[in-house]
Amino acid sequence: MRVNPGSTVLIKINHMPDAKHYFKRMYIYLKSVKDGWIDGCRRVNGVDGCFLKDICRGELLTFVGRDANN
């Protein structure tokens, strides 16, 4: 946030009745990536995901786009 002002970082945790907190998910959106996306990317997008099956279960999602140089 210091280096890239205007970025968005959201962290969600689960609050359990036994007063413990567990990580649930994280969202990071860098301002420089957003500006570059708006200025130079075509509207070709893709979403890919995979399921995490080890100790940290969940799903990892990635959103990608192509610039003018492919």
Image (cartoon, rainbow, N blue to C red):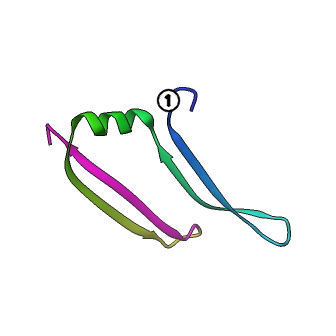
Q: In this view, does 5 lie above or below 69?
A: above
Question: Please, is residue 23 above or below residue 31 in the view?
Answer: below
> What residue is shown at x 49% (from left), y 29% (from top)?
4
Residue 60 in the image: x percent, y percent? 44, 62
- Position of 11 with respect to 4 (left or right) is right
Residue tagged 1: 4
User: Which quadrant of the figure contains the N terminus?
Assistant: top right
The residue nearer to you, when weighing 51 against 35, is: 35
**Outermost residue to the left:** 69
Magenta stretch encompasses residue 66: yes
- Dot 1 crowding, Cα within 10 Å, few <14, some 14–19, many 20+: few
Per the rendered image, the range of residues in magenta is: 56-70
Q: Does the magenta stretch include residue 58?
A: yes
Q: Give the x, y percent position of residue 50.
A: 39, 68
Query: 22 or 44, which is in the foreground?
Result: 44
16 lies left or right of 67: right
